[in-house]
Image (cartoon, grey):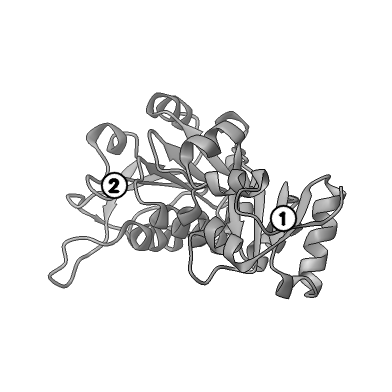
């Protein structure tokens, strides 16, 4: 395929990319949107060529845009030069990124995980906020974690908000989905420590034994770990609250736990 120029908001490809803001459309197509040249290049460098690449005229001459265009065309993807108005509509931002890529979603099956491949893994139970989820994926990448397991009904890691928060790490960290029952059965074979966080726990998070590979299990933003999930842990710990706040943001707490384990 070759590059082409599109200026109409009613163009079928433009409409299809705009529709990827809807989870239903992402689920049906298996596609998602990543904004910005940095994120697009991160995808390409980790073996994920865009299915569709959109860029504004001002970005066309950038060397990395040319790299992205070549990688997209080599993978039989579609390259479109579009107007600023189209980029704004696709991104739903007044000041959009000059490059937008559409990529295929990737989920790793639970049964193929190799626990010893990393010192630490993260499991999130029914996480609700895409910003939290994206930040946790980014933190897990920074700390060298093996992957992020989404347990139960979680928000979509491939939503635009979550992908933005990963800052490109969406391409670097394996994502795994599992039901509560699947996770509980699979956890029985985990070779290291499974560590959860509870406000009622008595063990300080710095004093727990993190036998590697450690699996950090975190509850959601509203309820934390429910009793059945907490029961799957070898130890539940608490992060001390020294001020008036009685809890931490989920992504901050998960980051603290990841670095305690690593």
Tell me if residue 108 can be seen. no
Q: CA distance from mark 1 to mark 2?
A: 45 Å
Image-quadrant location for residue 7: bottom right
- Residue at image position (65%, 55%) is 8
Q: Position of residue 183 (x, y in %)?
A: 44, 30
Label 1: few (<14), some or many (≥20) within 10 Å? Answer: many
Label 2 sits on a secondary structure element that is strand
> Position of 88 compared to 216: left or right?
right
Which residue appears at 15% of the width and 73% of the height? 243
Residue 236: which disc? Answer: 2
Figure quadrant of residue 68: bottom right
Identify which residue, 32 or 20, lies in the foreground.
20
Q: Nearer the viewer, residue 80 or 70?
A: 80
Residue bearing mark 1:
53
Q: Nearer the viewer, mark 1 or mark 2?
A: 1
For image coordinates 18% across by 71% down, the residue present is 242
Residue 195 can be seen in this image: yes
| Residue 35 screen position, x and y as percent | 59, 61
């Amino acid at each position: 395929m070759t590059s082409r120029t599109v200026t109409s908001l009613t163009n079928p490809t433009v409409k299809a990319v705009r529709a990827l803001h809807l989870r239903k459309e992402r689920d049906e197509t298996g596609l998602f949107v990543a904004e910005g040249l940095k994120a697009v290049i991160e995808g390409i460098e980790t073996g994920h060529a865009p299915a569709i690449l959109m860029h504004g005229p001002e970005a066309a001459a950038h060397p990395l845009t040319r790299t992205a265009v070549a990688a997209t065309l080599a993978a039989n993807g579609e390259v479109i030069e579009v107007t600023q108005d189209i980029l704004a509509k696709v991104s739903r931002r007044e000041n959009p990124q000059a490059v937008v890529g559409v990529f295929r979603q990737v989920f790793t099956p639970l049964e193929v995980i190799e626990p010893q491949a990393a010192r630490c893994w993260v499991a999130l139970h029914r996480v609700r906020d895409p910003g939290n989820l994206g930040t946790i994926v980014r933190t897990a990448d920074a700390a060298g974690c093996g992957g992020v397991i989404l347990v139960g009904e979680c928000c979509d890691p491939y939503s635009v908000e979550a992908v933005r928060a990963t800052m490109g790490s969406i391409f670097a960290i394996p994502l795994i989905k599992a039901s509560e029952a699947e996770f509980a059965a699979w956890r029985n074979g985990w070779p290291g420590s499974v560590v959860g966080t509870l406000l009622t726990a008595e063990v300080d998070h710095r004093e727990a034994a993190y036998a590697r590979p450690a699996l950090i299990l975190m509850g959601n933003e509203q309820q934390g770990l429910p009793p059945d999930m907490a029961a799957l842990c070898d130890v539940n710990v608490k992060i001390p609250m020294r001020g008036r706040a009685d809890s931490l943001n989920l992504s901050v707490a998960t980051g603290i736990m990841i670095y305690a384990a690593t």
